[in-house]
Image (tube, rainbow, N blue to C red):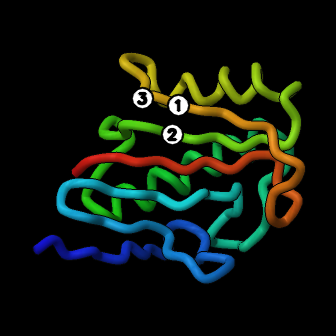
């Protein structure tokens, strides 16, 4: 029987609702959407570029807490408030995956918690 494990780290912002930062199941890791919140201060990063970097830093922290890493991501989903930001988010995102990037979806949404500009989630393996 498979055992689900809850992943929690102080290096990423605490869940803002009834969900876990991440869930592990066998060799898979499911990282909940990471807002661009600095876990040390609780503040939202300023501007699209910094928000994208902070969201990726938070994804990385949850993955590492689960015994995984960015290079083991299979699929990401990015939520952005405005599709006009797509090119900028792509430029920053590409820096994290210089070779063999994971599968990905990107959606423009009407709004994100805390009025964030971006949120990133992923599925990875250990």
Task: Quadrant for the N terminus, please.
Answer: bottom left
* x, y percent for residue 115: 88, 59
Q: Secondary structure at mark 2?
A: strand
Is residue 75 shown left or right of residue 110? Answer: left
Q: Are marks 3 and 1 in contact (CB under 8 Å)?
A: yes
Image point 40% across, 57% down: which residue? 30
Q: Which residue is mark 3?
A: 102
Image point 42% across, 76% down: which residue? 8
Residue 43 quadrant: bottom right
Q: Nearer the viewer, residue 44 or 84?
A: 84
First in sequence: mark 2 vs mark 3:
2
Q: Quote the CA–CA distance across marks 3 and 1.
A: 6 Å
* x, y percent for residue 99: 38, 17
* x, y percent for residue 37: 70, 62
Q: Which mark is residue 3?
A: none
In the displayed structure, 24 sits above or below 28; it is below
In the displayed structure, 44 sits above or below 20; it is above
Q: Which mark is residue 76?
A: 2
Image point 54% across, 25% down: which residue? 95
* x, y percent for residue 114: 84, 66
Q: Which mark is residue 104?
A: 1
Number of marks drawn: 3
Q: Pointer 2: residues within 10 angstroms few (<14), some, or many (20+)?
A: many
Q: Secondary structure at mark 1?
A: strand
Q: Are marks 1 and 2 in contact (CB under 8 Å)?
A: yes
């Amino acid at each position: 029987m498979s055992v689900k494990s809850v992943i929690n780290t102080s290096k990423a912002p605490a869940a803002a609702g009834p969900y876990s930062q991440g869930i592990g199941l066998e060799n898979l890791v499911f990282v909940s959407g990471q807002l661009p919140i600095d876990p040390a201060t609780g503040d939202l990063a300023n501007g699209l570029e910094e928000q994208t970097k902070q969201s990726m830093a938070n994804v990385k922290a949850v993955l590492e807490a689960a015994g995984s890493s960015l290079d083991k991501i299979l699929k990401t989903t990015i939520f952005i408030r405005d599709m006009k930001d797509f090119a900028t988010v792509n430029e920053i995102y590409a820096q994290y995956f210089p070779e063999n990037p994971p599968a990905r979806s990107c959606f423009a949404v009407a709004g994100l918690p805390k009025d964030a500009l971006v949120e990133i989630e992923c599925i990875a393996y250990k």
